[in-house]
Image (tube, rainbow, N blue to C red):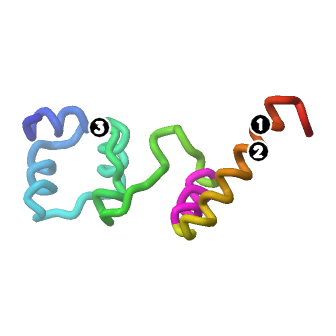
Amino acid sequence: MTQNQVAEALGIAKRTQANYEAGSSDATASYLSKVAVQFEFDVPYILTGRRSTLALDSLNEIEDRIVQQYRSIPADDQRAIRRFIQAMADDAGKGVS
């Protein structure tokens, strides 16, 4: 996309878009929010290099936090959690409470 197209899609001035791209202005939170919604970008990844699991409307904050915690624990513990969740899902499928 051209700068004009991006600026138009985001409802901002072309000059503002050019300044953000050139690094002569820091992008505002409002701008980043528009970019995330309009183009489905992972803003935390752009800013920090760390992927967010919170995709647009797919996970709520609690679910995202659980995924981040899961990723921070050792592989053996991750396997144990997966077995536990599978057992719970199997029980739920059978109507066991």
User: Residue 46: image x %, image y %?
Assistant: 28, 57
In the rendered view, would you say 95 is above or below 56? Answer: above
Is-magenta flag for residue 38? no
Q: Earlier in the sequence, mark 1 or mark 3?
A: 3
Is-magenta flag for residue 68? yes
Residue sitting at 11 percent across and 43 percent down?
14
Structural distance between the alpha carbons of marks 1 and 3: 38 Å
Q: Quadrant of the C terminus?
A: top right
Identified by mark 3, the residue type is Phe
What residue is pinned by disc 1? 90
Identified by mark 2, the residue type is Ala
In which image quadrant can residue 35 be found?
Answer: top left
Which mark, residue 87?
Answer: 2
Q: Quadrant of the N terminus?
A: top left
Structural distance between the alpha carbons of marks 2 and 3: 38 Å
Which mark, residue 37?
Answer: none
In which image quadrant can residue 45 be found?
Answer: bottom left
The magenta stretch spans which residues? 63-71
Residue sitting at 32 percent across and 36 percent down?
38
Q: How many marks?
A: 3
Image check: 60 left or right of 53? right
Residue nearer the viewer, 94 or 43: 94
Residue sitting at 23 percent across and 33 percent down?
9
Which mark, residue 39?
Answer: 3
User: Residue 96: image x %, image y %?
Assistant: 90, 36
Residue nearer the viewer, 44 or 72: 72
User: Residue 56: image x %, image y %?
Assistant: 46, 40
**SS state under label 1:** helix
Image check: 83 left or right of 53? right
Identified by mark 1, the residue type is Asp
- Contact, mark 2 vs mark 3 (Cβ under 8 Å): no
Residue sitting at 43 percent across and 55 percent down?
52
